[in-house]
Amino acid sequence: MILVDKIIDNNKITKVTFGSGIESINGGAFAGNVISEVDFSRSTKLTTISENAFINQKIVSLSLPSSVTTIGKSAFYGNLIEELELKGYLLKDEKTNKGSF
């Protein structure tokens, strides 16, 4: 299992491309960056994007893989999202919170 943790926060990252082994992105993992582009196209095992993972970035377009079932509170809050594609079914309970976007 591969996790992305807060080790990459506050680094002025602008683009992130995830590989096929990523399963979870932990809370606040990308806080303090300036990400405008995220590529999940190879992330077939990604199930969880935790709270505040991509908070206050500059993401305009977002396509989440069908494997994602849980999106934490404020995971994408404060972005500039104009286009959102959800390819799978998110769990409709406390695991996908209002305010995720």
Image: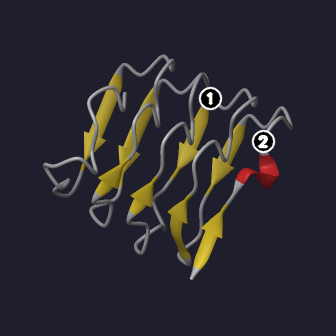
Location of residue 6 with respect to 59 vertically, above or below: below
User: Quick one: SS at disc 2?
Assistant: loop
Contact between marks 1 and 2 (CB within 8 A): the answer is no
Q: Residues within 10 Å of mark 2 (few under 14, many from 20)?
A: some
Quarter of the C terminus within the rendering: top left
Residue visible at 78% across and 37% down in the picture: 13
The x, y position of residue 3, in whole percent, is: 62, 69
The x, y position of residue 99, in whole percent, is: 33, 26
Q: Residue furthest right?
A: 11
The residue that disc 1 covers is 36
Please give left or right for residue 31 compared with residue 55 in the image: right
Residue visible at 56% across and 83% down in the picture: 1
Which of the pair 21/1 is nearer the observer? 1
Q: Residues within 10 Å of mark 1 (few under 14, many from 20)?
A: some
The residue that disc 2 covers is 9
The x, y position of residue 44, in whole percent, is: 40, 72
